[in-house]
Amino acid sequence: GPQTAVVDGDAKSLSIAAASVIAKVTRDRIMEASDTLYPEYGFARHKGYGTPEHLNALNRYGPCPLHRRSFRPAS
């Protein structure tokens, strides 16, 4: 159905704020589980963010199947 963007929605709506927290916690847990499949990337530590550690792993090992090819360092 139709959607409406709410700028700074997490500051304006408790339900948006709660959904944001749930999404982040869920994603962090997925990244921690992914660390067991691809430990060389350190997903449990950086959660997939473009930290120096993560970028160094990409340079050393290349992208794994979890990396988005649209992310320049993984392309």
Image (spheres, helix red, strand yellow):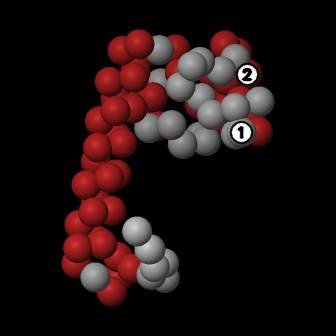
Instruction: Examine the rendered structure and indicate whether residue 20 appears above or below residue 47.
Output: below
Quadrant of residue 2 in the image? bottom left
Q: Report helix, strand or loop for mark 1.
A: loop
**Left or right of 4 on screen, residue 19:** left
Badge number at residue 59: 2
At 35% across and 76% down in the image, what residue appears? 10
Instruction: Examine the rendered structure and indicate whether residue 35 appears above or below residue 49.
Output: above
**Left or right of 1 on screen, residue 68:** right
Q: Report helix, strand or loop for mark 2.
A: helix
User: Going from the N terminus, do you reach mark 2 or mark 1 first?
Assistant: 2
Residue 46 at x, y percent in the picture: 47, 37
**Front-most of residues 58 and 72:** 72
The alpha-carbon separation of the residues under discs 2 and 1 comes to 16 Å
Residue 40 at x, y percent in the picture: 52, 14
Q: Are marks 2 and 1 in contact (CB under 8 Å)?
A: no
The residue singled out by tag 1 in the image is 70
Quadrant position of the N terminus in the picture: bottom left
Check disc 1 and give the amino acid type.
Ser
**Front-most of residues 26 and 52:** 26
At 27% across and 63% down in the image, what residue appears? 19
Quadrant position of the C terminus in the picture: top right
Residue 41 at x, y percent in the picture: 53, 21
